[in-house]
Image: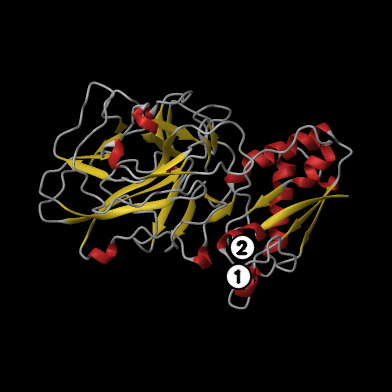
Amino acid sequence: MLLFKVARPLPPANHQGLLSSRALRRKPIQPMKKHSLGTLMLFVSISLFAQEVPDSINMVTNGSFEEFEGRLKRLGSIKMATGWDSPTEVPADLFSGTISGSDASAPRNELGEQGALTGENYAGILHWSYMGRQPRSYIQTKFKKMLTKGQKYCVRYYTSLADMSKYASSEHGVYISRMMVRKNDESSLTYDVQVPTLRTKIYDDPYSWQGVCGVYEAKGDEQYLVIGNMAANEATNTEKIKRPKGLSGAQLMHAYYYIDDVAVFPIRLMSECTCKQLDEAESEFIYSRKGRLNPSLPPGEQVDQMVFYFKRFQRGIDQAMDATLTALVTLLKENEEIKVRLVGHTDVIEADRVRMRPDLTELARERAMSLKDALMEEGIAGDRITTAGVGAESPADPEESEVALSKNRRVEIELE
């Protein structure tokens, strides 16, 4: 299947309750000896302000970690990602949506829950730990070709704080060098980070992806990039983070971050390099309800509590909802007496856009129908499912923030 996605400018990803993942639901891809999801997707970018950079100008190979070889089973497997490695004896992590029930799965894994910004995979590094009790990890890659002397490059990646982290930290950045970095022990790197020039910002959002970026003027012949914290523990600003609602277990005494969409590309103007993501009208974010359903509830009540969320203008079931879909299918198969009514909703921006985009007129109903189709594909009889669309008339949250609007793009399940 070949999908075309137009990348659009986006607002700063600072929205609580949001996670980002791919726009259309696909059947799960089974792990093979070599995974190359890039061969399944063609991204056409109309702006470098979006998070995706055309591969033809990106100096980084496999910047979204979609290609990996072997069977991913555990943490510490960044070497499996094509073109990536760890420069110290502390291996960084690779997470993938192509596996489930593993410490290294996505969106739910050992460190928390987060959907990939692009595709299904992302990396993870331990950025800081309390009193330096745990060794830091880093990721390193070699550019496709040497950087050109005097050429300005935009250096950018996206990061998200893992849910289980008790701390958030500053000193996020990139070190670029001519020689490969190799340290045969677990001690932290202490190189002078070039990008960004100011690294005092504390990245404290466990719900969405935040950009780290800056402009680098090449000295000539640089070949390698390393991402991670290279400042001393006492020079790293930190703050404690409240545990996200619905998350069980004790938080860990560190700041751990997921990494996705690493890009280095040539620019002419400083203004061409930005960390912005989606514009509000084209939000790629999808609401995330932390926590799981209470299995002690009767099956009908569990079904009644399920909600499927959507990106703005999205019709199909997002991959971020796959776990919820699997749970719903299981409950319906085990309880054949349950019949459901799927009710689709939109947010007010989608409702307003109908004036300019008549194709959105039936968006709420189409969302409900897409969930019905997904259930029928899994073997649930169609006569057990009815659908309806009510537009933006019954918001789950009446506020106008991006978080509130993301809650309103949904399909609710009612018992018949």
Tell me: 256 left or right of 346.
left
- The answer to which of 194 and 53 lies nearer the viewer is 194
Which labelled disc corresponds to residue 405?
A: 2
Kind of residue at disc 2? Leu
304 versus 378 height, above or below: below
Tell me: 154 left or right of 64.
left
* Quadrant position of residue 33: top left
> Can residue 404 be spotted in the picture?
yes
Q: Position of residue 69 (x, y in %)?
A: 40, 28
Which labelled disc corresponds to residue 116?
A: none
Kind of residue at disc 1? Ile
Q: Position of residue 191 (x, y in %)?
A: 19, 38
> Can residue 359 be spotted in the picture?
no
Identity of the residue drawn at 57% across and 30% down:
100
For label 1, the residue is 349
Q: Residues within 10 Å of mark 2 (few under 14, many from 20)?
A: many
Determine whether the residue tagged by mark 1 lies in a helix, strand or loop. Answer: helix
- Report if the CB atoms under discs 2 and 1 are less than 8 Å apart: yes
